[in-house]
Image (tube, rainbow, N blue to C red):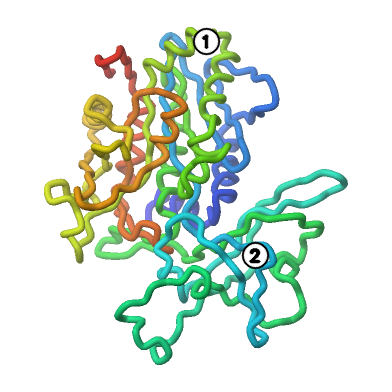
Amino acid sequence: MTKQIENVSAFLESSLTAFHARDNVKKILEENGFVPLKETQDWEINEGGKYFVERATSLIAFSVGKLERYAFKIVASHLDSPAFKIKENPEINTEGLITLNVEKYGGGLWYTFFDRPLKIAGQLVLQNEGRLETKTVEASFPVTIPSQALHINREANDHFAVNLQTDVLPLFGLNNGESFLQSAFPNEENILDYDLFLVSAEKPYLFGKDEAFLASPRVDNLTSVFATLNALLSCAESNGICVATFLNHEEIGSVTREGAGGDFLDKTLRKMNFALRFDDNEYDKALATSFCLSVDNAHALHPNHPEKSDPTNHTKLGDGIVVKKHADGAYVTNALSLAVVKTVLNKAGVPYQNFFNRSDAKSGSTLGVALLSKVSVLGADIGMAQLAMHSACETFAVKDYHYLLDGLTAFYSSEIEIDNETVVIE
């Protein structure tokens, strides 16, 4: 395993929830000289500076290059993945066995969460001397959702549908009189509330001939997050402003104050503009020549079910970055923006492949559509091919991560000058 893939694996394993992913991103940024800013304060930023700002679980980082050409190069990805969220008063006592009442977060492949280690993790809200403070936490022990034995559920191999109220209750412990919070977080006091999740604790592992593949929880979309972060770290000499947008709540529609449907990116870009002493007219001109990559993974052709893929556009593991288009606007890409991406990738020698859904299948979407409805710039949807999307353990080809990192680095390093329907790329 190369050092780069070791780092990806460590990030996937430790970023149990969006809270953990945000904290990990923040730590890496601070280690690399990025200065924290606050939405509640005035900003002082300068050419050559590196900064980040948080809003709840989301974070936007940016580096200010030479401003001879004032424009934004934006890459957006999301921090959250499907999981189970633990309800209030979750304890269910069944003959002395304690299970937890949960509800789904996002659209998971729920049967894959059975019979494997799961971690309780997320954020607590604590009261401390009149202050409400948040703390990212994980329980010290795993739990699991046990399947019914085949002897009891004889139809399980023929047609089993997961009931989200009765089938997915994790086995937490034997009844010892302690509450769920006391047992899970015995060292925490004055807990007023929580956003706690049940997430896959499977360790990432390489598999296949020549260790070509990596399987892990949260491949969608933390591989995009980690590649974006590392591409940003390498773009200090770029002209314009390189922006990395890490947002929460994509899996539940993005319509929150910290999601792509909120105004976090718009407000952040405007505060940059104000701090750099530009007026609204300059800001509008900058947006008109800016570009955004929405980075989220895509379905690879499944070797056991190739018929599920588009008949003329086979997206394959190991064949390069995926570029996405959709006639009904599930992605922000059009012919011009896709041509920009292809030109950047061709210049960098990074392979790419087209992704289209089957015409008789419902398309998923990404955070790009929500994001660019608030910040109107030319944009495209790209990502990495993967299998088992939204499973408790997903798969991608190792070489595709390298392609994605190289492609995002090339994007940040490129000069993209847009004049309506004419684009010059250097």
Quadrant in which the N terminus is drawn: bottom left
3D distance between C-alphas at marks 2 and 1: 48 Å
Residue kind at label 2, given as amino acid type: Ala
Give the side of residue 152 with respect to residue 315, left or right. right
Q: What element carries label 2?
A: strand
Residue 287 coordinates in the image, percent (x, y): 42, 17
Residue kind at label 1, given as amino acid type: Asp
Q: Is mark 1 on a helix, strand or loop?
A: helix
Residue at x 34%, y 84% (from the top left corner): 155
Residue at x 47%, y 64% (from the top left corner): 203
Quadrant in which the C terminus is drawn: top left
- Count the marks: 2
- Image mark for residue 280: 1
Residue at x 22%, y 39% (from the top left corner): 351
Residue 414 coordinates in the image, percent (x, y): 33, 23
Residue at x 47%, y 66% (from the top left corner): 202
The answer to whether residue 325 of the structure is visible from this angle is: no
Whether tag 2 and tag 1 are in contact, CB under 8 A, the answer is no
Q: Name the residue under label 2.
A: 139
197, 262: nearer the viewer: 262
